[in-house]
Amino acid sequence: MSSSPTVLMRLVASAYSVANKAGTIVRKVMAGGDLGVVEKSGANDLQTKADRLVQMSICSSLARKFPKLTIIGEEDLPSEDVDEELLENGQCEEILKKTCPQQYTNIKEEELVVWVDPLDGTKEYTEGLLDHVTVLIGIAYGGKAIAGVINQPYYNYEAGADAVLGRTIWGVLGLGAFGFQLKEAPAGKHIITTTRSHSSKLVNDCISAMNPDHVVRVGGAGNKIIQLVEGKASAYVFASPGCKKWDTCAPEAILHAVGGKLTDIHGNFFCYNKDIKHMNSGGVLAALKNHDYYASRVPETVKQALVP
């Protein structure tokens, strides 16, 4: 190798290994039988033992290796000593061998912000809808999502007792996205993926306006973006203020790395600076292709109800 890996590629390589570890923790908690569920703001806003342990694992592992990073996690946890068993020091060698895109070669550690959703699709996790669950680690620079890592702890879980469970996909803007087979949704079909547990009149009005051929209701923002890049859906529509920056940072980076587009309902890009508000109050609209078509069909009433 001609030169040592850049800060960004080292961080992505670490995040990859940390995300793999996170997937193992998620499966271990489920196998243990006690999910340790607590309600945060209500019955649709849950936190489990897996959320807590995974966030500690990700944040502590990355902070130990990159002490100048800003790391923002979903769960509000007390700072405490983290069990060594939760820490992951590995780095994915395959990622370290990749060439960092030119525009990111001189990034300093302190300029990066990492957004962590330790368990995206918690409600589905508690209900046994395991394929909806993802672990999200998004990396932002200059307010823009530039890299992301998504682990699916239960990928392949319906393939039988001997199947290898889980996979980790990752992407960097200007480099591409890896760990899955990129596929477009059937041409001419409008297959909309949207929320399963946070539906509302606004959400449904917006979807109806897009004349969908089919609507897929599933949990987790990470899961929905994977549906877009694997050709199972043509657009992700969420006309609600319920989504947060840690839900969209990693998925946005991966979608943008393969030429897709993720914005709010008004067509504005999200900003991921460390001092930005966490709520995506303008909703979410994403597509691998034809984002403009879906954006053009958002009703004015929906736009007026969702102030960015």
Image (cartoon, rainbow, N blue to C red):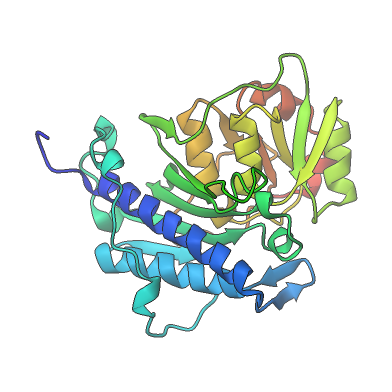
Which quadrant would the N terminus be assigned to in this image? top left
Q: Is 278 located above or below residue 250 in the figure?
A: below
Query: Residue lying furthest top in this view?
Result: 188
Q: Is residue 305 left or right of residue 143?
A: right
In the foreground, 240 or 198: 198
Q: Residue at x 70, y 31 (%)?
A: 235
Find residue 38 and report its horizontal and vertical position in percent. Answer: 69, 79
Q: Is residue 209 left or right of residue 134?
A: right
Q: Residue at x 73, y 27 (%)?
A: 294
Q: How many numbered marks are there?
A: 0
Q: Is residue 118 left or right of residue 101?
A: right
Q: Is 289 located above or below residue 254 in the figure?
A: above
Find residue 65 and report its horizontal and vertical position in percent. Answer: 26, 63
Q: Quadrant of residue 111?
A: bottom left
Q: Is 305 located above or below residue 102 in the figure?
A: below
Q: Residue at x 20, y 42 (%)?
A: 106
Residue 308 visible (yes or no): no
Residue 97 visible (yes or no): yes
Q: Residue at x 45, y 72 (%)?
A: 56
Q: Is residue 133 left or right of residue 250?
A: right
Query: Residue lying furthest front in this view?
Result: 162
Find residue 24 and report its horizontal and vertical position in percent. Answer: 49, 61
Find residue 161 and report its horizontal and vertical position in percent. Answer: 62, 51
In the foreground, 35 or 148: 35
Query: Residue lying furthest left in this view?
Result: 2
In the foreground, 24 or 192: 24
Q: Is 132 located above or below residue 128 in the figure?
A: above
